[in-house]
Amino acid sequence: MDCDMRPTTPIKLPKASGVVVSANTSMLRVYAKSLCTACTPIVEFGHNICELKFTYNDTAQTITVLSSKAHIGGVHTVGLMFQRTAASVASLVMRVLCVLFAIFGYTASQKTIRWCDPTALSTWYKRAIYTMSPPIYRYSATRSASRASASTATGSSLGM
């Protein structure tokens, strides 16, 4: 997998040797997880804050961990790492295109609808542009319809 894995956390060492030190440090839990029987396992990360009690031996330059437990009330962050394949990249591209299509469809639905001349939209490119981004009119469809009905009732649209 293309991932820079540096799951180490720096710990400040005590100056005196043999002293029990208590420190809160970040801890990563890494384990494999499979979502189905025949699937390739993926890597799941868990990030917690850990209460650590340890002693440091200065002559041997070793740390002895006496106890470690999860910090109560801390936030547990979870992350997944998937293998990058052609199928996963194609899936991501399709999801982005679907989201963009939904956004453009919503914005196009907010514009006024009008009938168009089929000969004016002769190429597939012009039809796609017209579908995604129809022309914007000053009045909404409901306001235009109410104005048209008012002008028809007064006879102004017939040229009288």
Image (spheres, rainbow, N blue to C red):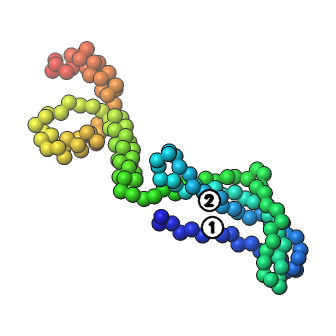
Residue 45 lies in what quarter of the image?
bottom right
> What kind of element bears circle 1?
loop
Answer with left or right where residue 125 lies relative to residue 106.
left
For the question of whether residue 107 can be seen, the reply is no
The percent coordinates of residue 154 (x first, y second) are: 25, 15
Residue under circle 2? 30
Dot 2, crowdedness within 10 Å: few (<14), some or many (≥20)? some
Considering every residue shown, the one lying at the far front of the view is: 38
Q: Amino acid at mark 1?
A: Pro
Q: Residue at x 40, y 53 (%)?
A: 88
Relative to residue 83, is residue 17 depicted above or below? below
Front position in the image: 130 or 128: 128
Instruction: Report whether 33 appears left or right of 72.
Output: left
| Quadrant housing the C terminus | top left
Task: Classify residue 60 as left or right of residue 118.
Answer: right
Q: Percent position (x, y) of residue 84?
A: 42, 59
Mark 1 surroundings: few (<14), some (14-19) or many (≥20) residues within 10 A: few
Comparing 158 with 130, the one in front is: 130
Q: Amino acid at mark 2?
A: Val
Q: Residue at x 88, y 80 (%)?
A: 16
Distance from label 1 to label 2 (Cα)?
9 Å
Nearer-the-camera pick, 46 or 131: 46
Q: Position of residue 153 (x, y in %)?
A: 25, 14
Q: What SS does tag 2 mark?
A: strand
Residue placed farthest to the bottom in the image?
A: 59
Q: Considering only order in the chain, which callout, 2 or 1, is on the residue closer to the N terminus?
A: 1
- The label nearer to you, 1 versus 2, is 2
Query: Which residue is found at the position 16% from the left and 19% from the top?
Result: 158
The quarter of the displayed image where residue 57 is located: bottom right
Disc 1 target residue = 7
Q: Residue at x 29, y 18 (%)?
A: 150
Mark 1–mark 2 CB contact (< 8 Å): yes
